[in-house]
């Protein structure tokens, strides 16, 4: 009974934190400028600190620092790429967030076979749910933007491929961070966000997605 109440309490904390964080984060992203840059810098500092706490060899710590710096540079560049950079940024963000929500909800409700040993909470149902929810919410966003801002070309097959690719990379990022948490005997990367854990727990997929998208734009 105590364990059930603890899980229920964590669920409510997770929901309440999400309700507060999503509107605040969206406001900062849309506002851009100093708001966004300061916010990004603060998140970077917390991320570096949480990575530093991992019980890893020095070379892995240094590689992690370099990766995080490049990842956040990619985030900065994509958001400030052009006057419409915010819309493309939100496009990527929606895929990552809906991937996370889909994996959590479908995995909790449907359960089923485990996906991988290094991340015991991941299931095949969660993986499928991540793809389904990311496709649903992102196509809704695309249609909204196409009808209101004429920024997206609807019904282009490239969008489906891009959504699935970003969702897949986001899930890989989640698994990679879970692997390092297990190596360090940590349940969460921190306790900053009630019900969610640390900063890296929430952006684990995004820090892998944005560098890849940035490199694709850079070279292609």
Image (spheres, rainbow, N blue to C red):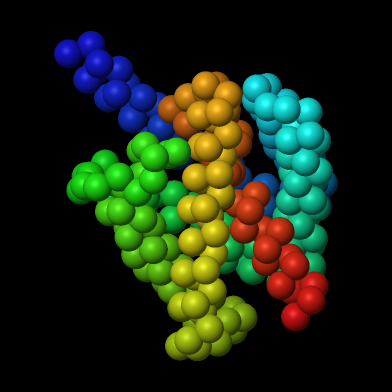
Quarter of the figure with the N terminus: top left
Taking depth in this image into account, of 97 and 53 the one nearest to the observer is 53
**Viewer can see residue 86:** no
The answer to whether 161 is drawn above or below residue 68 in the figure is: below
Quadrant housing residue 42 = top right
**Viewer can see residue 61:** yes
The answer to whether 215 is drawn above or below residue 21 in the figure is: below
Residue 16, position as x, y percentages in the image = 41, 32
The answer to whether 24 is drawn above or below residue 78 in the figure is: above
Q: Residue at x 37, y 68 (%)?
A: 136
Q: Residue at x 51, y 37 (%)?
A: 178
Farthest residue toward the top? Answer: 2
Quadrant housing residue 82 = bottom right
Quarter of the figure with the C terminus: bottom right
The answer to whether 211 is drawn above or below residue 84 in the figure is: above
Q: Residue at x 54, y 74 (%)?
A: 162
Residue 172, position as x, y percentages in the image = 52, 53
Image side of residue 58 versus residue 104, left or right: right
Taking depth in this image into account, of 86 and 77 the one nearest to the observer is 77
Image side of residue 141 versus residue 131, left or right: right
Residue 164, position as x, y percentages in the image = 47, 69
Farthest residue toward the left? Answer: 1
Residue 5, position as x, y percentages in the image = 24, 17
Q: How many numbered discs sit on the rendered protein?
A: 0
Taking depth in this image into account, of 171 and 132 the one nearest to the observer is 171
């Amino acid at each position: 009974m105590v364990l059930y109440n603890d899980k229920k309490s964590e669920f409510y904390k997770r929901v309440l934190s999400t309700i507060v964080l999503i509107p605040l984060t969206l406001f900062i992203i849309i506002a851009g400028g100093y708001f966004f840059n300061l916010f990004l810098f603060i998140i970077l500092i917390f991320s570096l600190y949480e990575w530093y706490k991992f019980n890893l060899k020095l070379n892995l710590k240094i590689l992690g620092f370099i990766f995080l710096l490049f990842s956040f540079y990619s985030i900065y560049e994509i958001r400030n790429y052009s006057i419409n950079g915010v819309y493309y940024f939100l496009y990527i963000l929606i895929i990552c967030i809906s991937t996370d929500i889909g994996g959590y909800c479908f995995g909790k409700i449907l359960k089923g076979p485990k996906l991988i040993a290094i991340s015991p909470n991941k299931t095949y149902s969660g993986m499928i749910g991540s793809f389904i929810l990311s496709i649903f919410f992102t196509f809704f966003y695309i249609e909204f933007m196409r009808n209101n801002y004429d920024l997206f070309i609807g019904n282009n097959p490239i969008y489906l491929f891009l959504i699935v690719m970003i969702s897949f990379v986001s899930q890989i990022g989640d698994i990679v961070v879970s692997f390092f948490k297990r190596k360090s005997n940590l349940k969460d990367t921190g306790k900053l966000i009630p019900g969610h854990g640390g900063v890296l727990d929430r952006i684990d997929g995004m820090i892998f997605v944005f560098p890849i998208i940035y490199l694709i734009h850079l070279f292609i």
